[in-house]
Amino acid sequence: MTNRKVDEYNFTEIEAKWQKRWRERGTFQTDMDASKPKYYILEMFPYPSGSGLHIGNGRAYLIGDVLSKYHRLQGYNVMKPMGWDAFGLPAENAAIEHGIHPSEWTRKNIGLYKEQMERFGFAYDWRREIASMHPGYYRWTQWLFLQLYKHGLAFKKQALLNWCPKCATVLANEQVQQGMCYRCDTPVRKKEMNQWFFRITKYADRLLENHAKLTGWPDFIKTLQANWIGKSFGTELDFQIVGLDEKITVFTTRPDTIYGCTYMVIAAEHPLVKRLVAGSPKERAVLQFCEQVINTPEIERTSEVSEKNGIDTGRKCINPSNGKPIPILVADYVLYDYGTGCVMAVPAHDTRDYAFAKKYGLKIDEVIEPYDSAEKPDNDSFNGVGKMINVPREYLGMNSNDFMEAIIDVMSRDGWGRRTVTYKLRDWLISRQRYWGVPIPIIHCDRCGVVPVPEDKLPVELPYMVDFITDEISPLAANGEFVNTTCPKCGGPAKRETDTMDTFVCSSWYYLRYASPRYDGGPWRDDEIKYWLPMDQYLGGPEHACAHLIYFRFVTEFLYDYGYLPFDEPTANLLVQGIVFFGGHKMSKSKGNAVDPMPIIEKYGADSIRLFVLFAGPPEREIDWEDHIQREEGAGFHDYRMVGVEGTYRFLGRVWRLVHENIDAIDASKLAVDIPMISDEELHRTVAFTIKSITQEIGAQKQLNTPVAALMELNNYLMKWTKPNAGSKDFSSDISQALSMLVRMLSPYAPHIAEELWERMGGKGSIFDIRWPGYDAKVVAESLVTCAVQVMGKLRDTIEVPPDISAEALETLARGSKAAKYIEGKQVVKLISKPPRLINFVVK
């Protein structure tokens, strides 16, 4: 150790230097290499909006960057590409608002995003960059449409759909949130239109069954998907309409209540309604009621607390179990797109039916009685298992579950019912009535009908000049030069399809294109697909659970089934990062609470903010920005001290000083060792423990916050160790190896300062060309202590820790253990820590 003056940690110069050098050297570029195991890691396709990255959406890229750099250091051939979900309404709306073409707006935004990503030090292979708006990309999106069409999975039909009047386009069910457009928060109304769909319902069972292959997906995402698909086992029953040669078919999971069915309710959107009331005195009133219901947000119609409304059609149907006529009503709580759109109402045994029957004075017939009279509610339905009453003699007193099987046998024998399965999942609506999207490659010919565009004529390109202000007419539909064409079959006059595709189609296959981004002989090269795919790690937000994450699985399964791909799931591993909150809301540009990282980078450097965001919590955990800032009294919303970032900045400064204070003692020949062999036993054990814990936490557990704490602990230890040991005969060898381990393990988190220190220490080449360090397993095994992790006095996990672990380090490790789920969302009111044997969290 010397008293030499330490150079200033000038992060501005250091970060610019290494970003330039990585770019020039192609440090993070990757090609196929059969001599190495591959690792394909990808974050979800970002949409390049006008204001660029914020801390919330940048978190996933930081997580992915650490994992990619770590696996590169572990000897993997890492592919980490980036591209742009460049189509969509925001760019088109910006064109209208600012008088700039969507392509110019989007390209400008992409430039901003790329600049910000490079400032963060992200390790992307920019040679693989793609953008969904480029004809070289959407040519193959159109090709995908044609394959689905060829195999009967793309079709057009008339349907009542969600219409956003502000965006002037149709929305899929997943894009309607609490009755509002997911883009602009405008109330959505229903509109009947002829639209294109993908038959995703054909894959409902496959999507569920393949959950078994998604071994690295969070359970809650698979549960959300299962609920969205909504597979239900039950029965279909037929009710003959009185006076019409037509039946109403209903789906029910409770055929045991059939004798208690006293009326029929039908959805306002159901086409049968018009036939029921045609020419009757009730026709006008019923149709007016239906129009009102159709334009009521679905969340209001299905809410358990909202009042149920209905109207009698004047028609009756026959309860097939007892031959009694029952009234048919239209009700707002029945949805056309679930089951058959008709429901047999059993008010005695269904809460909503009960409330509806009470309101309209409809008959209530009990057919199931609880075994314990105390279970029977006074003013509500009984929905449990009980004994049968008010049924034919042979069934009286029978357990209702047993009766269910008996009545299914009867209805199957007599032909008025059958076992069946139904799903909540509906076919994927892909039509959009806007300009800025992929044109659907279909031509309409009066003579030949619907004609797909020949594959060798792709892409069908968007015209550059269109009129964006067209009310409810698509801008493409108003462009005669685009619309008018010739039929590929007969050569006669024809018209192009003017709908564009949902942007989720672009992102349903983009992960495949990264393998062969410039290939023009097909959407990908088979050899590159076989080498790189499926993905090894995918990252993104939980908001895509029931949209993108279902859609890209469906497309992959389709491509596998028809021989286009050798695998049927995109990835077995999905990491869903926690949401970043600020001011009580999810960080969002639209909420005005987004934190721009660029001023923070200017003040503290990219490495400081990288460390802070990763240190703030485990990847899957939520982060509240308020917990890491300090606001003066009376300060504005965005006026505060960034105490969390200041902390990581100070830590990097300590690492910088530690290396430079010992720079003259460093032996460059000791820096690239695979396993450090340090003569000082305590130092050797400390370094080995640190390597082991960080390796396990990043590699096996993907817990990226606890390694930062471990690095801080190691740095603090080395600062104390160097002073009394500077004169020892093995000091040069020991400190060289210890500092090498510190800087190498820091490199995925703070790549710029790590590269600079590596170079100043005498390391050869890039630090990312050196293998991740190993450790002396014997030293670790001899010294580990088993620590009990308790929550409220109950054992929730055990962890292996060093015998001299500090209370702070023990808490950090415990919070990253399996006990974390018992602490999440709760306040730790007391911490009982007895290192190294016990730690107990008292929560409320």
Image (spheres, rainbow, N blue to C red):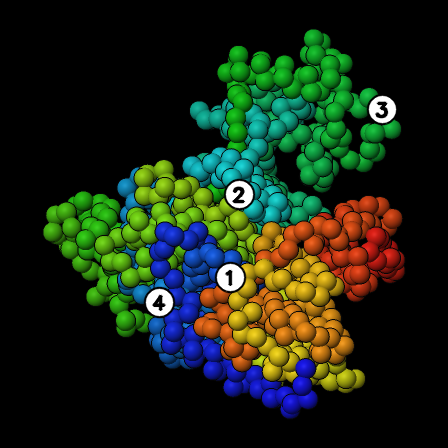
Q: Name the residue that disc number 1 marks.
A: 771
Q: CA distance from mark 3 to mark 4?
A: 71 Å
Q: Given the image, on which type of amino acid does mark 1 rest?
A: Arg
Given contact means CB atoms under 8 Å apart, are the residues at marks 2 and 3 in contact?
Answer: no
Q: Amino acid at mark 2?
A: Leu
The residue closer to the viewer here, 351 or 708, is 708
Residue annotated with mark 2:
214
Mark 1 or 2: in front is 1
What is the distance, in whole Å, between disc 1 and disc 4 at their CAs?
25 Å
Left or right of residue 838: residue 595: left
Q: Nearer the viewer, residue 348 or 680?
A: 680
Q: Residues within 10 Å of mark 1 (few under 14, many from 20)?
A: some
Nearest to N terminus: mark 1 or mark 2: 2
Residue 544 visible: yes
Q: Which residue is mark 3?
A: 372
Q: Crowdedness of circle 3 by 10 Å Cα count: few (<14), some, many (20+)?
A: few
Q: Secondary structure at mark 4?
A: helix
Q: Is residue 424 above or below residue 186?
A: above
**Residue 648, percent from left and from top:** 67, 75
Residue 33: name its quadrant. bottom left
Marks 2/3: CA distance?
A: 44 Å
Q: Amino acid at mark 3?
A: Asp
